[in-house]
Amino acid sequence: MEHGIGFFETLQDGVCVENLQFYDAFESDNRLLFSCQKFNGLYCYDREKGVVELVDTFKNEDIHRCDLHRCVFEVDEQLYFIPYYGKNIHITDLDGKNQRWIEIADDSQKSPHYSNAFLINDEIWIMPFFLDNPLIRFNTKTWEISKNYIIRDFIKRDYMSLYESYIDVFCSDIGDKYIYFSLIGNNLLFYISIEECICSILSILSKDIKIRCIKCLEDHIYLTNTNDYRIVDYDYINEVSSIYELSGQHELIQYPFSRIIIHEERVIALAGYCDFCVVINPIEKKLDIIELNLPCDITRLSDGYALFTGVCFKKDTIELFPRGTNRLLTLDYNLKCINSEVVGISVSGMKNLVRRGYIEETENFSLNNYVNAILAKR
């Protein structure tokens, strides 16, 4: 895999494009709608034509704001874009038009920042990233919002003395009756009762466990670590942990696996900051490495970001949405890459400079982008 920095590339036909990255997308009629992570923009990618168009900018947000949204849900033929660093839930029709928004952040929050969201019946539960921010419940029928500080109050009351520095509610997943979560880089597992909205401690794991992400499957919670390649299988009914490790020597990379997915009971830790994934081998009690067979033209845009975060399961394939790379990948169920796509805006379309240093509003480029694009073409 080629490592580098930059968001521009020249394709085989000579066209220079700026690559776009996104966490999640809604697909209909072979068209992907997504919130761009690099700047404020709702984009549509036509997969048949290979063309990206700006549908709109997200209202009531800074035009320069990056990482606005974490995920998107479709409910009753409406799209709900759930914030990451943004301060609003944005609602659109299925084509991205008729945009409305509900502001969920307030002046009491030093920085709006949300780590995950779950669709539970008619409500979207939005998990905070910063401990001092509330758990938010948004009713998709009435658009009413309720805020609850149960996570902050519970942890500060009973567990804050265990931490020497600031902590983030980073990883979470949902089971049948509970939302399970942890604070990044520690060994504590918590849960929230969905029916009662009460926070409790589930388990304190061994001290050498530093949780990076979690995934639930029936009575088990699978965990990756921030500083090694191990995966922990925690059976919370029997309160027993099993640890799976890689055999052989491997270069230590921080946060190696940023996402766990489960397909037909296979537990897969996806490549985050490394270029392969692993699958739990329950018979031999170890991890099997699977090379993703990444295409030769894929690049790492920044060593500070995971390659992929968003995942979409289809009938016969798995799609990985680009976070710190320049390609949208399609894998078969053997986890081999069978297709890669460039999701980018053609630089040749930029013609007229407009106010505030932006290139045509339909392209949403800054003046620096314009200059860098010229340099890239040279």
Image: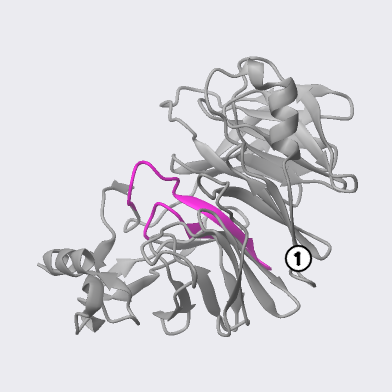
Q: Which residue is drawn at 19% across and 84% down?
A: 352
Q: How crowded is mark 1: few (under 14 residues within 10 Å), some or many (20 or more)?
A: few
Q: Nearer the viewer, residue 148 or 250?
A: 148
Residue 282 percent across, percent down from the top left: 73, 33
As displayed, is residue 95 above or below residue 27? below
User: Where is residue 327, by image quadrant?
Assistant: bottom left
Relative image position of residue 234 (x, y in whole percent)? 76, 29
Residue depicted at 46% across the width and 56% down the height: 67
Nearest to the observer: residue 152 or residue 79: 152
Residue drawn at x 67%, y 36% is 280
Position of residue 81 relative to residue 165, above or below, is: below
Is 277 or 114 nearer to us in this picture?
114
Left or right of 143, for residue 319: left
Q: Can residue 238 be seen in this view?
A: yes
Toward the left, the furthest residue is 378
Give the quarter of the image for residue 354.
bottom left
Look at the image and tell me whether residue 283 can be seen.
no
The foreground one among 41 and 51 is 41
Q: Which image quadrant: the C terminus? A: bottom left
Identify the residue shown where x is 20% and y is 68%.
367
User: Is residue 321 one of those drawn in magenta?
Assistant: yes
Q: List the single residue furthest toward the front.
A: 107
On the image, the x and y values in percent for residue 178 come to 83, 43
Residue bounds of the magenta highlight: 300-326
- Amino acid type at image mark 1: Glu
Give SS at disc 1.
loop
Residue, disc 1: 144
Q: In this view, does 239 lie to the left or right of 95?
A: right
Rendered image quadrant of residue 344: bottom left
Measuring from the top left, give residue 158's x and y in whole percent.
74, 21
Q: Verify whether residue 269 appears in magenta.
A: no
